[in-house]
Image (cartoon, rainbow, N blue to C red):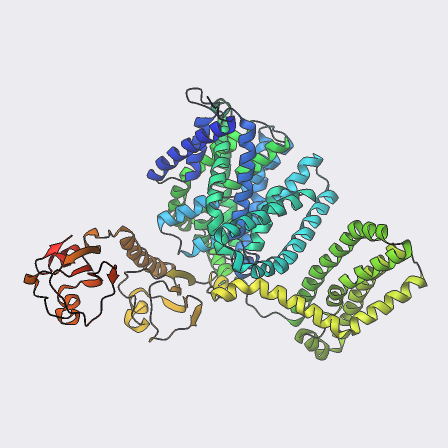
């Protein structure tokens, strides 16, 4: 008798438990993450009354794959451009929240006398709110269209990217076991270098590759290629000292900028759900009831630290970002939980062996409790605000109102210096990173290869020529790009005092270019002094004066820009640039899809009267690949259109209720199977009244609402296509399509 491998037995137990708990928690309208954790507890050795997993090591390896898919999917939903469009408020608030909550977590751990690494990891866990739980709570409570909900979701996006940075920093800190400022600075610089390098190279190469093989990309092939790219970046990230999860996130964020992003996200979603379930089940396996009982007091204190810390420090963070007190409190009360990233950080600490065994079950217990309380905390925000407002000193209230109304605009006019310097710094950063990467790759890989294949002198010359040729378009852009821009010309012509710093900046950029060329020549030929200076100056002069290099660098940059914006161009970029700025006003913007069955679908904007009924205004309509900006009253609204609507919280909420109500009716509608079409064999008999008449004269389609699709040939040659001039004879056999009721209405004859 054959036997199953332990891993298959374990997977069967895990997935059966997860499936059952998923159904139960779905019925209870609770987050599925909690169901997975409970399933893991039931399947673990800590539950002696049920079958338990036998090979924990293999299960944890599968859970690590789950982390990779979770971070890959998170990257697919993330976009670096989103941060640039959402305004300053979410960024300021997120940074303040993370710093304060990490301090709260560290102080809480210190108060219980825990080890420093436990305290640091606890601080990181407490700083990250749960995107999944908050999304679900907003959906269940119908708050997605509220202004504060948009701010919260913006903060969660910032927290996601900062969580990745935090993972890298904690990994570095865990390896060294002590904090060193220069080492941490070096790790952050290394992180920034590789982040820019991978993003720039990925955005340039991957969309080109996907366009070239588009005709070959079936769903199966696209899934395999996407997952292959994900794990390839995981291997690269690990080889240079970063966490595997960081590599998965980076590849997801690169693919998020391609036109295939939504398709990839759809294909990867089932795989992510499967492995993500295994990960959360493995989290539940770490729950030890005896440890939870033993550490009941720390658990209660951490729960209080999260709820009080988030409500106080998050409110302060949103106030600093220029939000009114009511909005700030609504946002802060929504963030009072920990979720997915807390589990990932706990797994990281456990795998690195730097955190204590008790920390994992404590975090799980805290997460479960704070997840259940999230909807209640959201509802408590407005009553808490009303209470505080009544007792708030008039002077402080007036100051907060003035501060919120005077919040800095992200669209304020930029002076030429700031605009020019930002462009130059961005250019120098990107092209400097690319040049460093080319030099490092050449020195470490190509120099030994080329000098090993060719004689010493020829090998050195070949290496120098190839490296400088590869550097040339990027070095020219580093030295010269933006030197003829409108901001540069305005500064040059505006004031003679501007010319000295402008010239100094040009000289600085040329010196950096000279350093790269000098390094390559010095490393290759070991030249020094005048022997090195003269060829460097000549090469730099040729680069600057070369029109071919200028066109080449412009082509490279244009290709990168097109790739970066191709998804928005394909979709019509429904969400405009001013969307983030509206969040700082009393009105804001939301996007809705017009459902089938809504009363005003198919009518014009004037006939629908959305402004009169709900007080909202349609700013744009996305219809397939067509975009209609500022539609007039004669523009039709069709089912499936995505409309960009502007209004206040109350107006958008009322409009959302109408949209959701119509969509719910469509989902609940039942198809009447009695109206399905049927195919029947009909024998024309003498009493039918069709004898001697043509098919056209019988009026079977018009009078009986049926369709003749074939006539049996009397020579047994099969079916003949019906023709209008066919004359019916006795015992002709025809095939009729129609509803059962319509077919029964035909003149009495033989039906089969």
Residue 165 makes an appearance in the image = no
Lateral position of residue 156 relative to residue 612, left or right:
right
Choose top left, top right, bottom left or bottom right for residue 99.
top right
Measuring from the top left, give residue 98's x and y in whole percent. 57, 46
Q: Observer-nearest residue: 322 or 170?
A: 170
Measuring from the top left, give residue 316's x and y in whole percent. 52, 49
Measuring from the top left, give residue 450's x and y in whole percent. 82, 53
| Extreme residue in the top direction | 48
Q: Look at 14% across and 59% down and name the residue there.
A: 742
Measuring from the top left, give residue 275's x and y in whole percent. 50, 39
Above/below status of 707 relative to 664: below
Choose top left, top right, bottom left or bottom right for residue 467.
bottom right
| Extreme residue in the right direction | 530
Choose top left, top right, bottom left or bottom right for residue 677.
bottom left
The mark total stands at 0
Residue 158 makes an appearance in the image = yes
Q: Observer-nearest residue: 718 or 681?
A: 718
| Extreme residue in the bottom direction | 493
Q: Look at 76% across and 61% down and name the residue there.
A: 470
């Amino acid at each position: 008798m054959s036997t199953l491998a332990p891993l298959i037995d374990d997977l069967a137990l895990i997935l059966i438990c997860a499936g059952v708990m998923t159904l139960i928690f779905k019925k209870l309208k609770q987050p599925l993450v909690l169901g997975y954790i409970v399933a893991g507890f039931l399947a673990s050795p800590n539950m002696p009354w049920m079958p338990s997993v036998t090979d924990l090591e293999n299960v944890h390896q599968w859970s690590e794959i789950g982390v990779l898919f979770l971070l890959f999917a998170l990257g697919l939903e993330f976009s670096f451009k989103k941060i640039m469009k959402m305004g300053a408020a979410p960024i300021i608030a997120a940074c303040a929240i993370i710093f304060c909550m990490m301090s709260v977590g560290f102080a809480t751990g210190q108060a219980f006398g825990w080890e420093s690494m436990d305290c640091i990891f606890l601080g990181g866990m407490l700083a990250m709110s749960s995107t999944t739980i908050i999304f679900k709570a907003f959906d269940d409570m119908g708050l997605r269209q509220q202004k504060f909900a948009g701010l919260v979701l913006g903060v969660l996006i910032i927290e996601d990217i900062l969580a990745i940075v935090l993972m890298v920093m904690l990994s570095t800190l865990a390896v060294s076991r002590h904090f060193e400022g220069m080492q941490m600075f070096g790790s952050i610089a290394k992180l920034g270098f590789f982040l820019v390098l991978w993003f720039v190279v990925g955005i340039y190469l991957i969309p080109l590759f996907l366009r070239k093989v588009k005709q070959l990309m079936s769903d199966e092939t696209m899934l395999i290629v996407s997952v292959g790219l994900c794990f390839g970046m995981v291997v690269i990230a690990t080889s240079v000292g970063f966490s595997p999860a960081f590599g998965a996130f980076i590849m997801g964020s690169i693919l998020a900028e391609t036109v295939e992003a939504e398709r990839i996200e759809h294909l990867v979603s089932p795989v992510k759900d499967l492995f993500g379930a295994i990960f959360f089940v493995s989290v539940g396996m770490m729950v030890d009831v005896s440890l939870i009982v033993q550490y009941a007091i720390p658990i209660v204190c951490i729960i209080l630290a999260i709820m009080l810390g988030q409500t106080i420090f998050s409110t302060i963070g949103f106030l600093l970002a220029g939000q009114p007190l009511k909005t700030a409190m609504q946002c802060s009360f929504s963030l009072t939980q920990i979720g997915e990233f807390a589990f990932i950080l706990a797994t990281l600490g456990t795998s690195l062996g730097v955190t204590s065994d008790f920390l994992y079950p404590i975090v799980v217990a805290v997460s479960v409790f704070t997840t259940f309380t999230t909807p209640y905390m959201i509802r408590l925000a407005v009553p808490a605000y009303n209470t505080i407002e009544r007792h708030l000193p008039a002077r402080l209230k007036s100051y907060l109102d003035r501060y919120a109304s005077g919040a800095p605009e992200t669209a304020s006019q930029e002076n030429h210096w700031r605009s020019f310097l930002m462009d130059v710094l961005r250019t120098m950063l990107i092209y400097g990173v690319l040049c460093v990467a080319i030099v490092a790759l050449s020195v470490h890989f190509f120099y030994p290869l080329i000098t090993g294949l060719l004689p010493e002198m020829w090998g050195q010359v070949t290496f120098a020529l190839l490296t400088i040729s590869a550097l040339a378009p990027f070095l020219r852009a580093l030295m010269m790009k933006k030197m003829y821009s409108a901001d540069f010309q305005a500064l040059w012509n505006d004031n003679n005092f501007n010319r000295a710093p402008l010239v100094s900046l040009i000289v600085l950029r040329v010196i950096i270019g000279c350093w790269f060329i000098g390094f390559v020549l010095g490393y290759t030929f070991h030249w020094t002094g005048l022997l090195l200076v003269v060829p460097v100056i000549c090469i730099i002069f040729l680069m600057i004066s070369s029109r071919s290099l200028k066109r080449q660098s412009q082509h490279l940059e244009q290709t990168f820009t097109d790739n970066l914006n191709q998804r928005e161009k394909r979709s019509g970029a429904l969400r405009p640039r001013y969307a983030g700025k509206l969040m700082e006003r009393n009105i804001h913007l939301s996007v809705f899809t017009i459902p089938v069955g809504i009363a005003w679908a198919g009518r014009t904007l004037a006939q629908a009267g959305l402004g009169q009924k709900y007080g909202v205004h349609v700013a744009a309509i996305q219809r397939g690949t067509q975009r209609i900006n500022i539609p007039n009253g004669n523009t039709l609204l069709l089912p499936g259109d995505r409309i960009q609507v502007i209004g206040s919280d109350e107006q958008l909420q009322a409009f959302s209720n109408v949209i959701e109500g119509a969509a719910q009716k469509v989902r609940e509608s039942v198809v009447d199977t009695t109206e399905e079409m049927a195919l029947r064999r009909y024998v024309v008999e003498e009493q039918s009244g069709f004898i001697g008449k043509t098919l056209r004269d019988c009026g079977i389609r018009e009078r009986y609402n049926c369709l003749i699709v074939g006539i049996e040939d009397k020579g047994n040659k099969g079916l003949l296509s019906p023709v209008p001039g066919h004359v019916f004879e006795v015992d002709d056999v025809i095939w009729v399509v129609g509803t059962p009721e319509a077919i029964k209405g035909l003149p009495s004859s033989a039906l089969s």
